[in-house]
Image (cartoon, grey):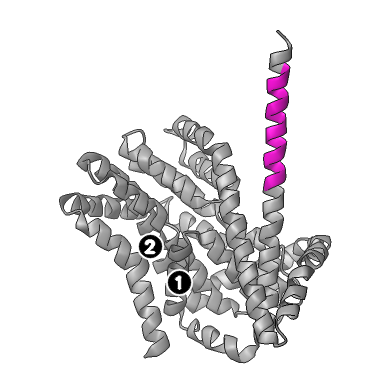
Amino acid sequence: MTTTPRFTSNSEVLATVQKVLTVVFLLCIFLLGVKGLGDGFKLLGRDLLQGFFSATENPFIGLMVGILATTLVQSSSVTTSMVVGLVAAPENPLPIANAIPMIMGANIGTSVTNTAVSLAHMARRDEFRRAFAVATCHDFFNFLTVGILLPLELMTGYLRSTATSLAFLLAGTGGYKFDSPLKAGLTVAFQPVIDLSEALFERQQAQGVVIILISGVFILGALFSLVKVMRTAMQSQVEAYITQFLGRSAVLSIFFGAIVTVMVQSSSITTSLLVPLAGAGVITLAQAFPLTLGANIGTTVTALLASLAATGENAEGGVIIALVHLLFNLTGIAMIYPVAAIRNIPMAGARWFAEIAVKSRRWALVYVLVLFYGLPAFFSFLDRYL
């Protein structure tokens, strides 16, 4: 009678330990990829990077690049991590001013996943109305936040200056410089990739391309695998916890949304779980909204983790742009959510557009294809070739 429970308990402990070790391993691979990205761009040279950096000097184009990159890889974490790597590159770093609109664009692009999930409810009008409203409320909030903070940043430099001050404080208290053993370990671990690139090609530019490609595979593979592992461990619990938090305070819901997103390393999972719950009538738009805002905060942890891998004299830049991502979301919530009249703008917009989409479902498809793919690609093409 006692052997079976003991065996079950040991199996659960073993499975938990295995998942923890897998997560740690994937995080190490992710950090290796971020570090390698900076090393690879270092080898490409100033002339090749100058074209890309000059294009992103236009904040609108930088915003479009962030949206398009995120919608293509279906993960703002990948986009922001790569931006951190570019800003912290040992040589020819991406200017922070150019990177800020890209970070804002990543915030918009990440909402394409839950909007696409809502399209699965198109066959049932009432379900689709509720699901599409919850999904697009995230879009409307992110666009409203960018509409406020991008002009403010261009006029005052609020995000950059505040993030720089916070990075300075972290440095003074042993923040990002404390991780020097980690950086040394990453340098040693990534050396075989550098040796491989040198064995394959003599030209530094070709070596840089190899390192960037391998680093990109590391980042994409690690993050997507990490999301898969965390989703299998947390998805059933998350759905149960969400229903428990219904009707609680907005602050608690925001906090819960942030914690869940940190645990599953994907805001798309958190927000996409809300869509079918809303379609089934389990949660309302007003209840889902603060959980979505919490997901926006939780997703910034990935960029902060990526900044740990930055090395060299520009490492502080990686920390600064990661803090910009966090400040952008915190400031947007602080400006919009506490005031009922402003808070109702994205919810009213989502309800209005949901009614339009229910009457003519093709508008929902046009909305996703044009807003998240068509317009960013079109404007990026115009800037590059015209």
Which residue is identified by label 1?
150
Residue 217 seen in render: yes
* Along the viewing direction, whichever of 350 and 24 lies nearer the viewer: 24
Where is residue 382, by image quadrant?
bottom left
Membership of 100 in magenta stretch:
no
Which residue is identified by label 2?
144
Q: Read off the magenta span.
A: 6-22
Where is residue 345, by image quadrant?
bottom left
State the residue at coordinates (54%, 79%). Answer: 98
Q: x%, y% of residue 294?
A: 50, 48
Query: CA–CA distance between discs 1 and 2?
Result: 10 Å
Identified by mark 2, the residue type is: Leu
Q: Residue furthest front?
A: 200
Task: Using a 10 Å C-alpha cutoff, classify the residue at mark 1 as few (fewer than 14 neighbours), some (14 to 19) or many (20 or more).
Answer: many
Instruction: Please name the predominant secondary structure of the magenta segment in the image.
Output: helix
Which quadrant holds the N terminus?
top right
